[in-house]
Image: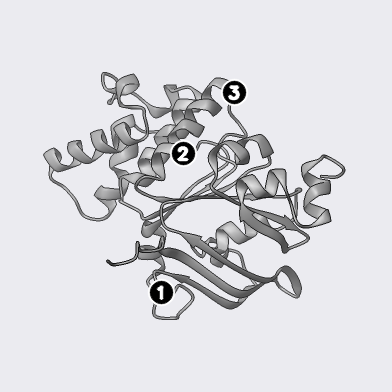
């Protein structure tokens, strides 16, 4: 009998320090994120969780005078190796931002944008990708008769799911979400949370959230950040019901943050 294979590590971070110029923003972070799990980062504003999220697909490269020490490996490949193609990296590691940011073009063209940019011209193939991506984002039934209308006519929640579909159209392996529901009402938030639970069947999802109830609802694991340090990372249930560190307990119980 072959033992069941342990869930594969998708992202392995070791000894990571991150600097904005001389200012150190992240300190000695070591963390494994496994395939097909939802991993949430929580902590007060300015604690480093969004900076760390942006480390995972080198979005911080766009900010002058930043530097990284340590290693970030995705499927064993160090993403900070000079030979890494950053465009391909960001295709494999897509990002959904805090506020929905659809392009001021049609719903169809928003989703088809990535595949077209990568050279795909076949209309039938583009249609299949658009439909598949919108179905995965639980949006197809709401927009299938409006594909040629402007994406700006959608509600905020629909726009955010459209942005998720746009990320999925280029077939990523990892989806990073930076407070994806902070600009949404409770009904739209619920739909996006349902979607996150579905997405982990096919993707690794990493989410930054200020909403602790959301982290408890959608994530398998949670890391608590404070002053650029991971104070504690564990199964989500353990973080919220039996934290090992006093700082985690104080934050969870609302004593600060």
Of 117 and 94, the residue lying toward us: 94
| Residue in the picture at 12% in, 45% down | 122
Q: CA distance from mark 3 to mark 1?
A: 39 Å
Q: Earlier in the sequence, mark 2 or mark 1?
A: 1
Residue 221, given in percent of the width and then of the height, sits at 57, 51
Quadrant of the drawing holding the N terminus: bottom left
Q: CA distance from mark 2 to mark 3?
A: 16 Å
Residue 43 in the image: above or below residue 215: below
| Residue in the picture at 62% in, 34% down | 182
Of 7 and 182, the residue lying toward us: 7
Dot 1: what SS? loop
Residue 24 can be seen in this image: yes
Q: Which residue is mark 1?
A: 76
| Residue in the picture at 71% in, 56% down | 225
Q: CA distance from mark 2 to mark 1?
A: 25 Å
| Residue in the picture at 82% in, 54% down | 247
Residue 103 can be seen in this image: no
Q: Earlier in the sequence, mark 3 or mark 1?
A: 1
Residue 18, given in percent of the width and then of the height, sits at 66, 71
**Label 3 crowd bin: few (<14), some (14–19), many (20+), radius 10 Å:** few
Dot 3: what SS? loop
Label number found at residue 196: 2
The quadrant where residue 179 appears: top right
**Label 1 crowd bin: few (<14), some (14–19), many (20+), radius 10 Å:** few
Residue 15 in the image: above or below residue 141: below
Label number found at residue 185: 3
Residue 86, given in percent of the width and then of the height, sits at 41, 68
């Amino acid at each position: 009998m072959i033992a069941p294979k342990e869930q594969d590590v998708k992202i392995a971070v070791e000894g990571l320090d991150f600097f904005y110029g001389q200012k150190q923003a992240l300190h000695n972070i070591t963390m494994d994120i496994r395939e097909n799990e939802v991993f949430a980062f929580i902590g007060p504003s300015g604690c480093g969780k969004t900076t760390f999220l942006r480390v995972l697909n080198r979005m911080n490269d766009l900010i002058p005078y930043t530097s990284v020490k340590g290693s970030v490996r995705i499927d064993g490949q160090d993403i900070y190796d000079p030979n890494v193609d950053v465009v391909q990296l960001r295709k494999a590691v897509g990002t959904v931002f805090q506020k929905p940011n659809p392009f001021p073009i049609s719903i169809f063209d928003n989703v088809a944008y990535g595949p077209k940019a990568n050279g795909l011209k076949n209309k039938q193939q583009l249609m299949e990708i658009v439909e598949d991506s919108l179905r995965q984002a639980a949006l197809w039934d709401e927009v299938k008769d409006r594909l040629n209308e402007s994406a700006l006519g959608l509600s905020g929640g629909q726009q955010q799911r459209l942005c998720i579909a746009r990320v999925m159209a280029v077939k990523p392996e990892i989806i990073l979400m930076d407070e994806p529901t902070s600009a949404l009402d409770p009904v739209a938030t619920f739909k996006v949370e349902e979607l996150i639970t579905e997405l982990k069947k096919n993707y690794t999802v990493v989410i930054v959230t200020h909403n602790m109830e959301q982290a408890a609802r959608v994530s398998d694991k949670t890391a608590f950040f404070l002053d650029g340090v991971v104070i504690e990372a564990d199964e989500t249930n353990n973080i919220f019901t039996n934290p090992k560190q006093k700082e985690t307990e104080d934050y969870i119980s609302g004593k600060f943050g």
